[in-house]
Amino acid sequence: MIRLVIADDHELIREGVKKIVRHCADLKVVGEAADLKQLIPLIAQVRPDLVVLDVTLPDADGLEGLATLLRHFPGLRVVMLSMHPEERYAVEALRAGALGYVSKGAATAELVEAVRKAGQGTPWVGPRVAELLAREAVAPAPPPPPHHLLTAREGEIVALIGAGLQIKQVAAQLGISVSSVNTYRNRIFRKMGLSSNAALIRYALQHGLAG
């Protein structure tokens, strides 16, 4: 029996995963969390075999959540569940310690297979991820453009600023504080080598990132 915890801030997604698992005699959901703050003490309490972790949590987006979990629980088995295509995070997630990466648009069978494999300590690689890994093995990929270094939340902020929204409007749109937006914006500037909103807007428009 593989005991798993689901971490996703969308209740519908958590319910969907539970519904899938309910039909598998060898899988059992022993807990769920909507953010990292809930997840860490939950893992310490129930000691699951595996965590199905959303790439984008309210308090940890991109691969920050994965890195934090593995710092607290070295050797924890994690399958990443993401709304982003495999090109965005999959290879990086596997290198960072995840045992699988499943797109939310994937077939149910892929998630079940990934959980079963990862629950046994075996990495699971879907067809698209296998293709990406094969490409890298044959010819190393060129350096990605700066915006590929951004987390999902940072990407959202770039899109909104690129669309002309003011910082207060961005904060209201995302349901976070103005200071949080400014913190994210400063990280974006550092990662992308930019120094002003005007430069960020130009970059967003040039690369089709504006929301």
Image (cartoon, rainbow, N blue to C red):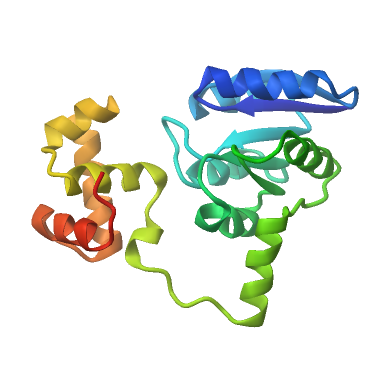
**Where is residue 171 shown, x and y percent of the image?**
21, 30
Front residue of 99 and 211: 211
Q: Is residue 46 above or below residue 70?
A: above
Quarter of the image holding residue 39? Answer: top right
Q: How many numbered marks are there?
A: 0
- The residue located at (83%, 38%) in the rendering is 116
- The residue located at (20%, 57%) in the rendering is 205
Front residue of 106 and 14: 106
Quarter of the image holding residue 138? Answer: bottom right
Q: Is residue 44 visible?
A: no
Front residue of 64 and 150: 150
**Where is residue 34 shown, x and y percent of the image?**
52, 22
Q: Is residue 104 above or below residue 85?
A: above
Quarter of the image holding residue 108? Answer: top right
- The residue located at (32%, 46%) in the rendering is 154
- The residue located at (58%, 24%) in the rendering is 13
Q: Residue furthest bottom?
A: 139
In screen coordinates, is 201 left or right of 67? left
Q: Is residue 143 visible?
A: yes
**Where is residue 152 shown, x and y percent of the image?**
40, 45
In screen coordinates, is 148 left or right of 162? right
Q: Which quarter of the rendered picture does the N terminus lie within?
A: top right
Front residue of 198 and 118: 198
Q: Which quarter of the rendered picture does the C terminus lie within?
A: top left
**Where is residue 124 shown, x and y percent of the image?**
77, 51
